[in-house]
Amino acid sequence: MAHQGKHIITPPISPLKDDGTLDVEAYNELLMLLKKLGLNKILVSSLYSEANLMNDKEYELLLRYSIDNARKFDFVAFSPRGLSLELMVKDLILGVELGYRVAFVPILLEFATTDVHTYRFYDFITRRVDIDIIISVNDPNIQLSVNALEGLVNDIPQIKGIAVSSTDIGYLLELLWRLKHEIRGNIMLLTNLDEVFPLALLMGFDGGIVLSSQVINRHFLDLVKYFEKGDLVNYLKAFADIMVFLRLFREAYSRIGVIKLALYLLHNWLRPILKQPYPSEHSYLYSEVKHILTTLGYIKEEG
């Protein structure tokens, strides 16, 4: 898997209709907009674990439609649903059958507790599915041992990269050094946090998975351009613009995130009596959860 240059990998949202099915027309418009704006690399079904709320039919439709559009992009990868190891393997097999060549595989929390468990998790997956793997760490609180990552990368040729969410600069520097100087040199190293992306470029990372490139893409594209030109003044200006937006973006999205998390948990508890795969914003359940969270003070009424 070639990865020359610096990368902005966008995880596009998967727009759903009121009945919970994928809005193919809206999704196509989004993909074409991203392409038009200069964002040429996408990571399907990874945005805030939205795929975890899809049933098999919806998930397959999303993957199938995205790979059909792959020729329009330089890079198209996907992420399996992260509810269980069994489901992950099932989704990865489906991705291979549809023609995907790269998958970003997040580690399940119960396997991130020790180096041995981490190794066994990815070794198990790569022995069952023939696809290039990017180790994906979605939780900023999880720091996989550099020793474990070194062992994985050296022992399993299918592992082609690592995407980390850490803001611990010491950890990131150690990981960078080990990957660049002590581990085979064809490994892609990405950040999985938007706010770390500008610093990661300066540190020597290959790029990152950038959620907010869907809405402030120009800043990120300019950042890479200024980095490649060595234009420090404009680089820092673009950096500052990104940080201002991300602060506002995070504050606005945090309230939505709380509601989505609550809905996800309630959906699992109430699954036997729910007819729709996921409550829409117009549903009674959504309104009830929002009311409860507002009463508890987690969100404001206008949120």
Image (cartoon, rainbow, N blue to C red):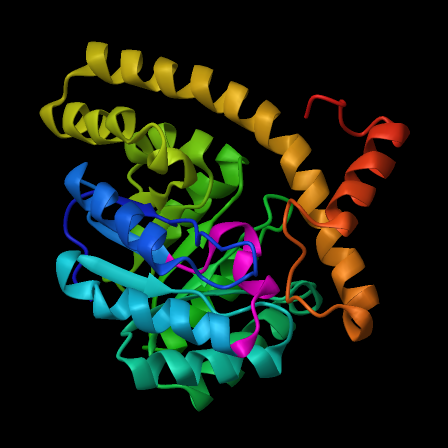
Number of numbered callouts drawn: 0
* Percent of width and height locating residue 37: 19, 36
- Viewport quadrant of the N terminus: bottom left
Instruction: Tell me if residue 123 can be seen.
Output: no
Q: Nearer the viewer, residue 102 or 32?
A: 32
Question: Taken as a whole, is the magenta stretch helix, strand or loop?
Answer: helix
Q: Quadrant of the C terminus?
A: top right
Q: Is residue 4 above or below residue 87?
A: above
Asked if the stretch drawn in magenta spans residue 52, the answer is yes
Residue under the image location 83 percent in, 35 percent down: 291
Q: Is residue 38 above or below residue 153?
A: above
* Span of residues in magenta: 44-56
Q: Which corner quadrant of the image does residue 19 belong to? A: bottom right
Which residue is found at the position 77% from the left and 70% from the top?
A: 271
In x, y percent, where is residue 22? 45, 61
Question: Quick check: 222 left or right of 170?
Answer: left
Which image quadrant is residue 301 in? top right
Q: Residue furthest left?
A: 229
Note whether 222 is above or below 123 in the view shown.
Answer: above
Residue at image x 80%, y 43%? Answer: 289
Instruction: Tell whether position 228 is magenta.
Output: no
Residue ranking furthest to the bottom = 128
* Relative side of 30 to 230, left or right: right
Estimate the x, y position of residue 205 in percent, counting from the top left.
Answer: 31, 42
